Amino acid sequence: MKLNSKVNNINISDNQLFEKLNIIENFKKIMPENISKFEIIDTETLIFSLKGMPAIKLVIGEKTTPSSIVLNSSESKISFSLTAHIKKIDDNNCSFELEFNGDLNPMIQMMVKNPLQSFIDDLSINTSKLV
């Protein structure tokens, strides 16, 4: 299953946003309000949970400066990745979009599609808080 967030324009350079997203602590600033758990394990790993959902461990994986950062699920029953796409607009502005890719069976897809779409949209919108 593949889901994309809304594309948001952010008043920060692509390089600055990329650097901020490389700091795992900054993910706490962009999490939605319905978060019930957020824990930093190390400089590349976090665990979070939304109310009513199991905890998810994410590890920063592949990075392409300054255009993308991939977060991969770890120790999860569902294998997925969350990719941050950053595109330069000009020296002081960029666009930001999140892409969810997961290998989910059809029954699970029906149950989680709407909450996941809402989650990645919230993360994308909240990224402007890093400015």
Image (tube, rainbow, N blue to C red):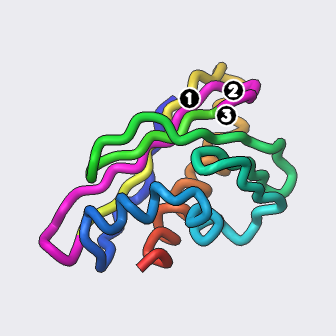
Task: Characterize the local packing of mark 2: few (<14), some (14-19) or many (20 or more) Cα atoms within 10 angstroms.
Answer: some
Q: Which mark is residue 110?
A: 3
Front-most of 23 and 89? 23
Mark 3 element type: helix
Label annotation for residue 102: 1
Say which quarter of the image contains residue 40: bottom right
Which stretch appears magenta? 74-93
Crowding at mark 3 (Cα within 10 Å: few <14, some 14-19, many 20+): few
Q: Is residue 10 left or right of residue 4?
A: left
Q: Main secondary structure of the magenta part?
A: strand
Tag 3: amino acid: Met
CA distance separating discs 3 and 1? 13 Å
- What residue is rendered at 30% in x and 71% in y? 9
Residue sitting farthest toward the front: 43
- Sequence-wise first label, 3 or 1: 1
Measured along the vertical axis of the image, is residue 7 above or below residue 67? Answer: below
Label 1: element kind: strand
Q: Please indicate whether residue 35 sits to the left or right of residue 82 in the image.
A: right
